[in-house]
Amino acid sequence: MSQSQATPTEPPTKNAAEPTTPPALPIEPMTATLQPQPAGYHDLKSALPVADAEFLASQLESNATVAQAQAAWMAEQNRRLESVRKEAEEAKTADEAAAKKPGVNTLGNGGTLQAAEGTGDPIARFDELVATKVAAGKPKARAISDVIAEYPELHEEYLAAYNAEHKK
């Protein structure tokens, strides 16, 4: 036999200049490993350190990736910020509306008798203040409570005068 012919038991000789091709790998298993995987609790906690537990649970439930969870957290923060801004604006509007109402602010606790001027009779002054509050739309029990809180000295005088009148 000549050297150029290969024997049936020997493989054919290859030229060293010919390129060799690697064996083909299946494509599906490789693409499956390249797909984004749902993030676990620790992944989400490290990627979103200030996110609350309720938000993290919602992301775990929806099988979100870290990137999806980060985008959702930014959207949630924007929603929460807008809600707080809206509440602050509503409070400011309510304060401005209250400031525009006609009238005088109440004195609150520690009011003086000068605000309850009238006759020298403490019972008549007290009853007049209660009647004014009832005329403004308050229930009588609430009006009495408010007058007591706003004019504690008048209330003491009222009690002393009432007890003196009704003493047997």
Image: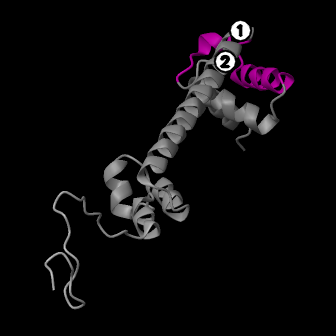
Residue 93 is labelled as 2
Q: Main secondary structure of the magenta part?
A: helix
Q: Residue, x 72% and y 19% (percent of image)?
A: 121
**Residue identified by numbered label 1:** 100
Q: Which of the 4 image quarters holds residue 160? A: top right
Q: Tell me the SS state at disc 2.
A: helix
- Judged left or right of residue 122, residue 72 is left
Residue 68: x and y, percent?
49, 49
Q: Amino acid at mark 2?
A: Thr
Asked if labels 2 and 1 touch by Cβ distance under 8 angstroms, the answer is no
Q: Is residue 62 above or below residue 140?
A: below
Taking the magenta stretch, the answer to whether it contains residue 121 is yes
Total numbered circles? 2
Q: Which of the 4 image quarters holds residue 158? A: top right
Of 123 and 8, nearer the camera is: 8
Which is more foreground, mark 1 or mark 2? Answer: 2
Of 116 and 18, nearer the camera is: 18
Q: Amino acid at mark 1?
A: Lys
- Judged left or right of residue 85, residue 5 is left
Q: Residue, x 23% and y 59% (percent of image)?
A: 18
Residue 75: x and y, percent?
54, 38
Q: Tell me the SS state at disc 1.
A: helix
Residue 33: x and y, percent?
40, 64
Q: Quadrant of the N terminus?
A: bottom left
Crowdedness near tag 1: few (<14), some (14–19) or many (≥20) residues, C-alpha within 10 Å: few
Q: Is residue 3 above or below residue 123?
A: below
Q: Which residues are magenta?
A: 110-136
Q: Is residue 165 at all visible to an observer of this figure?
A: no
Q: Residue, x 70% and y 41% (percent of image)?
A: 167
